[in-house]
Image (cartoon, rainbow, N blue to C red):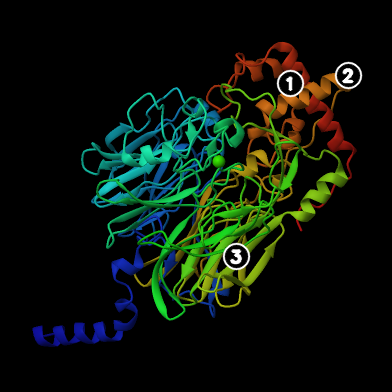
């Protein structure tokens, strides 16, 4: 072949392959950022897998992760390498085509730090920039790793007070060349903030606090001076105030703005947090900051005077939306409080706020003032109230997706109320107690009560028209707390479910086009990427998170256990998961000899100390041990385990808060609940 003919041959080859390869620039084939693009749309322009061939999708590869707990990561794919995280902030690097592990990095988070994590020892993923991988660790460090080797380059402590129950579960974001991270912890009494670090050195560039600190100290910023005027009383800085930025951030490079989603009050109960009333800025708000300096620009508060754990930390999507005759630069959010918001992202002007799930605490949002009109049905001050949505939210952290082709936002929503009751004996308690100023109430322990609760709860995948402020289609799901969402240019919506399926729907109509059994609940959002002309879909699976830990019978009904894995699919994929191990037998139970008084006392102590991990009404949700299933040996060692803890397993010792009599009462309550379970007829938990 002469030089000229070779050039000709290459040109012909390029022409032949032109169409697919033209669509395969690395910008399109990778998943380089948390939301794929800075707008966090979580939409893939790839379309080799599409509505007409998705039924041929099969498993390409799978990898078992180290810890079977909530798995929430969005994997990042850059140049054929996938970077993902599992529980306890462990980072994994893979050949994205074959699933071969390239390296693993374990930040050695002390396992009992998990007691500071309200909602499991989860991690939502890494950021990758210029050959470095950034991860926030559960115990509050931001770590930079070498992308090739997984070796630590630097590590900074992001916490202002290591004695408080701060955690990092969110993914770091790349903002104006820096790495930005926030924390969680507002269930336990902390003060929220976000910090930007120099990507090369880890040096702090700026920090923005979300709630005011002790007023005897100078304000950190003009914004804090403004915020302090909306707080009352003399204890909020002792309680912490809350307002953690534990998940969503969206960056608009053109406007030089960073939008942060701010969390709930600490405590939840506003009567204790700010006894004279007040909006309590910037709780439950979207705040726009100058991306390069962290200075305040504007805010929109979704729930003034939050009283219900109504975080605005939920996924924020930036989009240009045709509304009426004009195209508006907007941000979109479906926070926990049940309203879907459209804001002008230049100013924070409210453009739309419509209910996307059942909402009883507010009648509507007043479009003039931008404030919700409270109904009083959420006021639990004098008596317990059944409130919609619950602190789990009409939508929780699980990311949505915006499909520019359909113009729709796909929301992993849920219908799930809660009975809320004020804690008349509120004081700041040490770990592991939540400091919410509320008590567990109205949790059914009888069959009829549980069935009644299950009947009114469930998941909803909603296709929402943000311009019109209305639902276009909906898929009802038997269980709440389903996975995050991915849309693709192949007219597809991908979502995993609480009950262990991974499903593809048509984006225009919501028709089920394909589904597969993944053996465990899915909460994480899928991604898509392309290598050498082949499109892949990846999802991290592994049941866990807030509902799975605390939800008791509601979580149990999904009928899954936590098995953490990375799963990657492609057309014609032939891999298979190993068979599911059988459930252990229910052990024999000893006689219940304790008095009703002891059982009742055990119920109260259990719900103050144990329920946030082992489940409401002592029903395990499939992640941590179901205490009703304790064997005789564990029952015998119960006091030693509860008060001494299980080091290395994430079970803290409760010697400081519980005495031997308390533990005996818990043991009696758990045994009572085990007998309750035995006397029930077995029921089919999978609908
Ligand atoms: Ca919260």
Q: Is residue 105 above or below residue 292?
A: above
CB under 8 Å between callouts 1 and 2?
no
Q: Quadrant of the N terminus?
A: bottom left
**Cα gap from disc 1 to disc 2, whole angstroms:** 23 Å
CB under 8 Å between callouts 3 and 2?
no
Query: Is 306 displayed left or right of 554 in the figure?
Result: left
Residue 361 visible in the picture: yes
Q: Position of residue 259 (x, y in %)?
A: 38, 53
Residue 211 visible in the picture: no
Which tag is nearer the camera, tag 1 or tag 2? 2
* Secondary structure type for disc 3: strand
Q: Position of residue 619 (x, y in %)?
A: 74, 37
Q: Which residue is mark 3?
A: 503
- Front residue of 183/71: it is 183
User: Residue at image x 31%, y 38%?
Assistant: 221
Query: Is 197 displayed left or right of 456 in the figure?
Result: left
Which tag is nearer the camera, tag 3 or tag 2? 2
* Secondary structure type for disc 1: helix
Query: Is 415 displayed left or right of 483 in the figure?
Result: right
Q: Residues within 10 Å of mark 3 (few under 14, many from 20)?
A: some
Q: Which residue is mark 2?
A: 595
Q: Which of pointers 3 and 2 lies earlier in the amino acid sequence?
A: 3
Q: Position of residue 537 (x, y in %)?
A: 47, 64
Q: In the image, which disc is placed on residue 347? A: none
Q: Is residue 381 above or below residue 71?
A: above
Q: Position of residue 556 (x, y in %)?
A: 72, 45
Image mark count: 3
Q: In the image, which disc is placed on residue 633? A: 1
**Cα gap from disc 3 to disc 2, whole angstroms:** 49 Å
């Amino acid at each position: 072949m002469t030089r000229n003919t070779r050039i000709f041959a290459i040109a012909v080859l390029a022409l032949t392959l032109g169409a697919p390869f033209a669509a395969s620039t690395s910008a399109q084939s990778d998943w380089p950022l948390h939301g794929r693009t800075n707008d966090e749309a979580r939409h893939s322009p790839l379309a080799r897998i599409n509505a007409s061939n998705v039924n041929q999708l099969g498993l390409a590869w799978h990898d078992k992760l180290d810890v079977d707990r909530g798995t929430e990561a969005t994997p990042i794919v850059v140049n054929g390498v996938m970077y993902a995280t599992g529980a306890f902030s462990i980072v994994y690097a893979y050949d994205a085509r074959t699933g071969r592990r390239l390296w693993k990095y374990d930040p050695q988070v002390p396992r009992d730090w998990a007691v500071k994590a309200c909602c499991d020892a989860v991690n939502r993923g890494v950021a990758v920039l210029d050959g470095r991988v950034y991860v926030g660790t559960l115990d509050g460090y931001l770590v930079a790793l070498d992308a090739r080797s997984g070796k630590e380059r630097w590590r900074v402590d992001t916490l202002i007070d290591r004695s408080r129950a701060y955690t990092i579960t969110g993914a770091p974001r790349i903002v104006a060349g820096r790495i930005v991270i926030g924390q969680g912890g507002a269930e336990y009494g902390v003060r929220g903030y976000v910090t930007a670090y120099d990507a090369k050195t880890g040096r702090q560039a700026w920090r923005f606090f979300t709630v005011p600190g002790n007023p005897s100290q100078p304000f950190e910023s003009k914004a804090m001076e403004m915020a302090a005027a909306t707080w009352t009383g003399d204890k909020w800085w002792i309680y912490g105030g809350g307002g953690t930025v534990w998940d969503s951030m969206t960056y608009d490079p053109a406007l030089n703005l960073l939008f942060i989603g701010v969390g709930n009050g600490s405590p939840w109960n506003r009567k204790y947090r700010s006894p004279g009333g007040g909006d309590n800025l910037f709780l439950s708000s979207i705040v726009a900051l100058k991306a390069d300096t962290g200075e305040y620009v504007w805010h929109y508060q979704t729930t003034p005077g939050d009283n219900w754990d109504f975080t605005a930390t939920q996924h924020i999507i930036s989009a240009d939306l045709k509304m009426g005759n004009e195209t508006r630069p907007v941000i979109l959010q479906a926070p926990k409080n049940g309203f879907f918001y459209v804001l002008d992202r230049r100013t924070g002007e409210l453009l739309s706020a419509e209910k996307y799930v059942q909402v009883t605490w507010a009648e509507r949002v007043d479009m003039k003032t931008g404030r919700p009109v409270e109904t009083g049905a959420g006021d639990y001050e004098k008596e317990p109230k059944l409130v919609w949505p619950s602190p789990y939210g009409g939508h929780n952290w699980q990311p949505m997706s915006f499909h520019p082709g359909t113009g729709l936002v796909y929301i992993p929503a849920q219908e799930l109320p809660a009975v809320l009751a004020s804690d008349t004996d509120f004081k700041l308690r040490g770990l592991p107690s939540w400091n919410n100023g509320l008590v567990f109430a109205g949790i059914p322990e009888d069959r009829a009560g549980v069935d009644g609760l299950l009947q009114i709860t469930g998941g909803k995948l909603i296709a929402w028209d943000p311009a019109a402020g209305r639902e276009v289609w909906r898929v009802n799901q038997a269980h709440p707390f389903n996975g995050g969402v991915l849309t693709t240019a192949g007219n597809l919506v991908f979502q995993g479910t609480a009950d262990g399926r991974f499903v593809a729907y048509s984006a225009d109509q919501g028709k089920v086009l394909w589904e597969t059994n993944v053996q465990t609940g899915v909460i994480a959002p899928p991604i898509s990427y392309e290598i050498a002309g082949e499109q892949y879909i990846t999802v991290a699976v592994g049941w866990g998170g807030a509902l799975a830990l605390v939800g008791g019978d509601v979580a149990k009904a999904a009928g899954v256990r936590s098995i953490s894995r990375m799963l990657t699919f492609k057309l014609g994929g032939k891999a298979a998961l190993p068979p599911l191990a059988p459930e252990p037998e229910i052990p024999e139970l000893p006689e219940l000899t304790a008095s009703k008084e002891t059982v009742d006392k055990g119920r109260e102590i259990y719900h103050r100390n144990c329920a946030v991990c082992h489940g409401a009404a002592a029903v395990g949700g499939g992640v941590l041990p179901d205490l009703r299933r304790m064997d005789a040996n564990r029952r015998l060692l119960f006091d030693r385990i509860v008060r001494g803890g299980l080091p290395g397993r994430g079970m803290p010792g409760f010697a400081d808060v519980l005495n031997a009599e308390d533990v005996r009462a818990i043991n009696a309550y758990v045994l009572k609940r085990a007998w309750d379970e035995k006397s029930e007829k077995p029921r089919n938990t999978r609908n």
